[in-house]
Amino acid sequence: MKCFGATDTGLVRACNQDSYVIASNEVGDVFALVCDGIGGGNSGDVASQTAIQYFSEVFSANQGFKDEEEALTWLRYQVRKANDTVFTLSTTRKDYQGMGTTLVGVLLIPQGSYVINIGDSRAYASFQDGSFCCLTQDHTLVQELVNHGELSEEEMMNHPKRNMLTNALGIWSNIRIDLTRIDDPVDTFLLCSDGLHGYVPDSVIAKVMLDPRQTLQGKSKQLMNLALLQGGYDNITIILIQKEAGDKR
């Protein structure tokens, strides 16, 4: 398995409120996460860093999972604990009021690959059959309108409230956790903040991801440059995880 991560402040923002980690536990399982902080001032970066630090610490001490049920129970429990941690900070300190973060991640263990999502950061995958797709659905107002048939996909792209979140870590005491098992043979996972997918179309991301000539670092650099060429209006974070023949995860 090959892993690569990168983040860039972009060309407009003064602070990078994105955070990421590619963590491993005591038995070599991998848990990769991207968090995109939200909130006034610099509190967004506190939220994303707090969440990433929490998951990094609890996963590095993890000794593996006996089965899928134990892994999913652990994931849901730790996400709720991370939510409690960020929520407590945001409600007890005035300078952190209203802060929160998105979260997207992939857990790779012998029992399978599991994608977790809260907010509008995304997970994508290129598959061994040459296909490519998004693995997550944004938790946004416009996505809900699309789901209810009140808005088209085309209208969603330019809607003035397209970035309004309906779910995020640390904003509310209760959160919705999307958790998906990926059964089709994956070649490469992509995790990213909306600094990439909000400015670079999925069709362009797919073209880069499906290019067999590029290394992981090359793909990451190309995707980052594409986002910057669109103006670099937001922080950009990318994690790529390529599975290899013989991987048990």
Image (cartoon, helix red, strand yellow):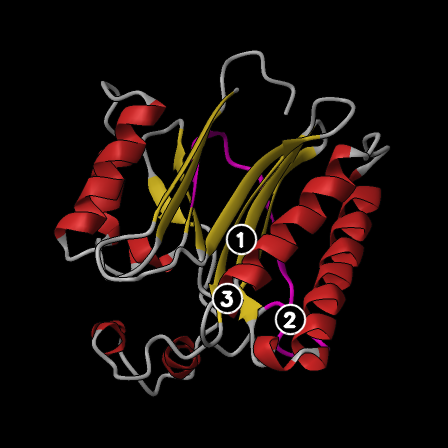
Circle 1 packing at 10 Å, graded few (<14), some (14-19), many (20+), is many
Disc 1 secondary structure class: strand
- Residue wearing tag 1: 104
Q: Which quarter of the figure has residue 28? A: top right
Which residues make up the magenta segment?
169-191
**From what the image shows, is residue 110 above or below residue 239?**
above
Residue 66 relative to residue 85: left or right = right
Label 1 to label 3: alpha-carbon separation: 16 Å
Mark nearer the N terminus (2 vs 1): 1
Question: Residue 171 lies in magenta, yes or no?
Answer: yes
Circle 3 packing at 10 Å, graded few (<14), some (14-19), many (20+), is many
Residue 38: % across, % down? 48, 70
Q: Which amino acid does label 3 sit on?
A: Gly
Marks 3 and 2: in contact by CB < 8 Å? no
Task: Identify the residue shown where x is 14% and y is 55%.
Answer: 230
- Residue wearing tag 3: 44
Residue 227: % across, % down? 22, 50
Residue 80: % across, % down? 75, 63
Which of the numbered marks, if any, corresponds to residue 170?
A: 2
Which residue sits furthest bottom? 150
Label 2 to label 3: alpha-carbon separation: 11 Å
